[in-house]
Image: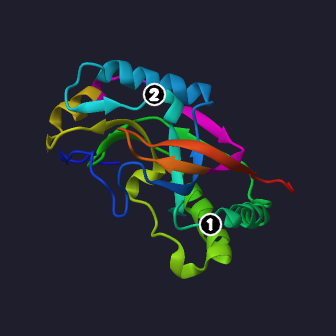
């Protein structure tokens, strides 16, 4: 997967977001994956002195699957129906096995691609259908940016060439790993800090009928 030639500052408000505002989202939390934690640790150790990047704390490692809507727009009474719709849709979807190895430079981050990416896309399609079933198709936010198929190691804090980041990643020797994910989380997300943070509202097991 090719590296981006340039990076830009990640610290910008996405449409509709501002300090203190929170939103509901579906995501795959990955902090409990020991192999992935080691891989991220190895890269972050190599990146510790690279200027222009903020390292993402291991506790907030995740893959964003689908945003649902801002908490001041989605009534709390819709949460349980959302969870039930997702449980129904995902009951036949087996737990995910995602592979991670070489990090890449993206326009706003240094990240680990999740492979196969089609697995994440298929999960998103099912989750979007479940969300639309409860809230209506027109209210479901657009699919996330490309960063959603990756686990972020660090976010860019400046604009400029990516040559030093590329060199650092390329020189870092790492071993591949896999992550086995057995549940999807519905969370209350905030973006007040350099990386996304959240409170878990509920979980949906994958392959519950398997």
Q: Is residue 128 magenta?
A: no
- Residue 12 in the image: state x and y as whole percent: 27, 51
Tag 1's secondary structure? loop
Residue named by callout 2: 40
**Residue drawn at point x = 79 percent, y = 61 percent:** 92
Q: Quadrant of the C terminus?
A: bottom right
Toward the left, the furthest residue is 160
Q: How is the image coloured?
A: rainbow
Q: Relative to residue 58, is residue 103 drawn left or right? A: left
Q: Is residue 209 visible?
A: yes
Which comes sooner in the sequence, label 1 or label 2? 2
At 35% across and 48% down in the image, what residue appears? Answer: 1
Q: Which residues are the magenta region?
A: 169-186
Residue 128, compared with residue 10, is above or below; it is: below
The residue wearing badge 1 is 75
Mark 1 near mark 2, Cβ–Cβ under 8 Å?
no
Q: Residue at x 52, y 63 (%)?
A: 72
């Amino acid at each position: 997967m090719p590296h981006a030639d340039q990076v830009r500052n990640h610290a910008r408000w996405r449409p509709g977001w501002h300090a203190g505002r929170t939103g509901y989202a579906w995501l795959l939390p990955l902090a409990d994956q020991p192999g992935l934690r080691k891989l991220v640790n190895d890269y972050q150790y190599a990146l510790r002195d690279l200027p222009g990047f903020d390292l993402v704390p291991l506790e907030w490692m995740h893959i964003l699957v689908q945003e649902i809507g801002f908490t001041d727009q989605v009534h709390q009474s819709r949460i349980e129906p959302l969870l039930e719709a997702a449980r129904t849709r995902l009951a036949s979807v087996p737990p995910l096995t995602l592979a991670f190895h070489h990090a890449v430079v993206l326009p706003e981050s240094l990240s680990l691609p999740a492979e196969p990416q089609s697995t994440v896309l298929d999960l998103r399609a099912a989750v979007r259908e479940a969300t639309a079933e409860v809230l209506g198709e027109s209210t479901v936010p657009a699919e996330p940016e490309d960063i959603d198929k990756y686990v972020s190691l660090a976010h860019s804090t400046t604009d400029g060439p990516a040559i030093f980041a590329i060199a650092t990643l390329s020189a870092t020797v790492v071993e591949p790993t896999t992550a086995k994910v057995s549940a999807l989380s519905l969370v209350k997300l905030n973006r007040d800090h350099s990386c996304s943070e959240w409170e878990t509202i509920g979980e949906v097991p994958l392959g519950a009928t398997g």
